[in-house]
């Protein structure tokens, strides 16, 4: 199971009460409904006290206004001794005192509006089943939701030398905010909708990147993409964080229905939250802290195992290829097929090449004779073209000479032959970088020719890439054209990655970062693909030691690489065995 999936499952179990079944059995007297009832009683009493205080202040303000009017009008009415005393003290006539009274009244009214009782939801279709001792509540009923703001970027004084940490989405990671990338000034705070939230406040992202949570480990302001959840009911902040984390998929589905991928405060306030008794919330947090920590440790261990596995895989692969190159993997096959011999096959190939050369030379002489005798200009040009083509074909008619190595790289079976890489294939590197320029590129279409890039070799695909040139430019670069069964090789950076051009691949040329290889015998391709991949990487690394930039060796070095060549049928057997072993090796991977 993937770590993220494991964490998601743990959160899902936790908010459904499945992690704390034993705790509930041992603490059956606990009930969220009872705690809500106690809270509501306290709220009622608090509201009653605030309303009483409000009436007192309103009475004082009214009296102050009345006395002020009487004094201003020069009223001759008599006042009580107590009121007269207050008046003499300047209470009713002091504008500052009246202003303070009004301010206190406004503050009390605001506090009274916050005195809301929590009504557990009676959900006929609840999101999921929760224990009987838990209650469903609206998020907005248990906390005040406030978003931040961004001071104007045009005002340097709002940002320069700022000391107030200012949280943006990039700072909300790993469920805690210890520091911020940016700071604002007191002036920036005063002239924007930004607010300072206390350490311990739960933050929740509501714009673009939805549903990320973090607890402030410092006092800080936030931007408008982050909502602060300020506790009004006595809950465990970390429990609420875990609860909201479990809802991330749901929140993202809400955001996808909005053009800018966001949710508003009203939507957030209406989230339905499962609320356990406080002690059970704390128990859930304790268990989840442990389990999530173990899951994170597991993820780290898993990544370490993957790195170790990758190194082991490479060693296994290298060992298997070495055994195959030395003939150890096909010992039994040679015993069962003792008549097979690479030298005989090379001899047969050379005889065919000699005959082909003989036929081409005969055709060449015939064309030369016709060229001398031909008077028609067009026919003469055609003869000249045929002569050029025949010359080219004749240069390819090379026999393979088995090497008589006194110091062979390693011992191979007697039925195998050492040959030069340049004897069994044609190699051509891509054009100089200056040969293909940006102004040559055209959109893909009927007359567009593809440019094969390194990623085609690295990712083993003929369809990747977005660069094309015209047929006119292609004609000038035709020597770099690739055909079916050509092998392209990445030559710089990620060196030695190879790809066989399949049938019906797009017509195209290689770029400067590739090399193309054409084997003289296409039946050797599967064997060649395996061992060229191994040898070219090994030799390239040796060739690039001490160099910051890794490049494939020059062609003159490549052509002189010594290759162990088994008989064709043994090549086929070796590739089958290696395919099977590599498949088994993949089955040992850590998921």
Image: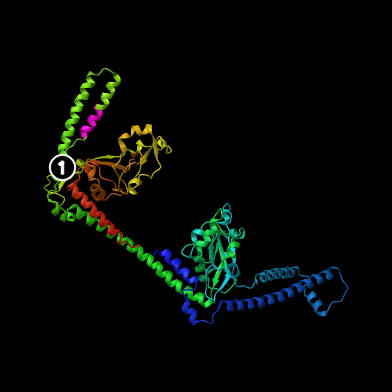
Question: In which quadrant of the rendered view does residue 506 lie?
Answer: top left
Q: Inspect this view and state whether residue 205 appears.
A: yes
- Viewport quadrant of the C terminus: bottom left
Per the image, the residue denoted by label 1 is: 346
Count neighbours of disc 1 (C-alpha within 10 A) and say few if under 14, some if 14 to 19, many if 20 or more. some
Vertical comparison of 106 with 23: above or below = above
Q: Residue 208 at what x, y percent from top left?
A: 52, 56
Q: Give percent across and percent down for residue 429.
A: 29, 40
Q: Give the vertical position of 528 relative to 367 (above or below).
A: below
**For the residue labelled by badge 1, is the local secondary structure a helix, a strand or a loop?**
helix
Residue 407 position, x and y percent, is 12, 49
Q: Which stretch did the figure color magenta?
A: 387-395
Q: In this picture, is 268 found above or below 382?
A: below
Q: Nearer the viewer, residue 159 or 50?
A: 50
**Which one is in front, 193 or 303?**
303
**Residue 379 included in the magenta stretch of the image:** no
Q: Is residue 392 magenta?
A: yes
Residue 62 is left or right of residue 215, and the answer is right
Q: Is residue 555 left or right of residue 300?
A: left
Q: Quadrant of residue 465?
A: top left
* Residue 494 percent coordinates (x, y): 32, 49
For this orientation, the residue located farthest to the top is: 375
On-image quarter of the N terminus: bottom left
Q: Please identify the dominant SS of the magenta region.
A: helix
């Amino acid at each position: 199971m993937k770590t993220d999936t494991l964490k998601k499952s743990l959160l899902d179990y936790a908010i459904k009460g499945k992690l704390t079944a034993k705790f509930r059995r041992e603490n059956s007297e606990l009930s969220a409904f009872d705690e809500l009832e106690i809270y509501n009683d306290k709220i009622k009493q608090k509201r009653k006290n605030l309303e009483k205080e409000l009436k007192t202040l309103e009475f004082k303000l009214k009296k102050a206004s009345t006395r002020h009017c009487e004094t201003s009008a020069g009223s001759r009415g008599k006042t009580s001794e107590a009121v007269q005393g207050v008046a003499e003290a300047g209470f009713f006539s002091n504008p500052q005192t009246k202003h303070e009274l009004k301010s206190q009244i406004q503050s009390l009214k605001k506090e009274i509006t916050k005195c809301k009782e929590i009504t557990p939801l009676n959900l006929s279709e609840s999101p999921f089943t929760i224990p009987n001792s838990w209650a469903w509540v609206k998020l907005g009923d248990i906390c005040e939701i406030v978003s931040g703001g961004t001071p104007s970027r045009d005002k340097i004084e709002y940002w320069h030398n700022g000391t107030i940490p200012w949280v943006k989405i990039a700072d909300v990671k790993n469920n805690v905010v210890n520091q911020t990338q940016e700071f604002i000034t007191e002036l920036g705070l005063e002239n924007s909708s930004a607010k300072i939230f206390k350490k311990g406040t739960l933050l929740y992202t509501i714009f673009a990147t939805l549903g990320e949570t973090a607890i402030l480990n410092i006092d800080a302001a936030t931007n408008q993409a982050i909502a602060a959840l300020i506790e009004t009911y006595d809950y465990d902040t970390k429990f609420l964080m875990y609860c909201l984390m479990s809802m991330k998929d749901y929140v993202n589905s809400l955001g996808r229905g909005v053009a800018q991928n966001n949710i508003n405060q009203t939507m957030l306030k209406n989230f339905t939250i499962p609320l356990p008794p406080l002690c059970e919330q704390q128990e859930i947090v304790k268990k989840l802290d442990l389990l999530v920590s173990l899951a994170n440790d597991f993820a780290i261990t898993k990544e370490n195992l993957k790195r170790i596995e990758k190194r082991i895989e490479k060693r296994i692969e290298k060992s298997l290829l070495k055994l195959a190159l030395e003939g150890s993997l096909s010992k039994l096959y040679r015993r069962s097929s003792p008549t097979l011999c690479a030298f005989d096959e090379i001899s047969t190939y050379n005889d065919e090449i000699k005959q082909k050369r003989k036929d081409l030379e005969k055709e060449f002489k015939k064309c030369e004779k016709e060229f001398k005798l031909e008077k028609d200009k067009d026919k003469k040009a055609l003869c000249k073209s045929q002569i050029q083509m025949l010359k080219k074909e004749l240069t390819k008619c090379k026999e393979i000479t088995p090497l008589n190595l006194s110091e062979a790289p390693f011992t191979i079976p007697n039925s195998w032959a050492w040959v030069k890489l340049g004897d069994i294939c044609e190699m051509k590197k891509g054009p100089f970088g200056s040969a293909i320029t940006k102004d040559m590129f055209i959109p893909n279409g009927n007359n567009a020719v593809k440019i094969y890039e390194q990623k085609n070799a690295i990712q083993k695909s003929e369809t990747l890439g977005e660069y094309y040139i015209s047929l006119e430019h292609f004609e000038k670069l035709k020597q770099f054209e690739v055909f079916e069964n050509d092998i392209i090789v990445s030559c710089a950076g990620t060196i030695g990655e190879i790809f066989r051009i399949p049938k019906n691949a797009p017509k195209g040329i290689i770029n400067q970062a590739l090399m193309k290889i054409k084997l003289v015998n296409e039946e050797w391709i599967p064997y060649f693909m395996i061992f060229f991949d191994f040898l070219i990487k090994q030799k390239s690394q040796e060739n690039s030691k001490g160099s910051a930039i890794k490049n494939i060796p020059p062609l003159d070095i490549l052509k002189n690489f010594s290759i162990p060549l088994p008989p064709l049928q043994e090549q086929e057997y070796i590739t089958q065995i290696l395919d099977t072993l590599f498949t088994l090796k993949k089955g040992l991977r850590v998921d």
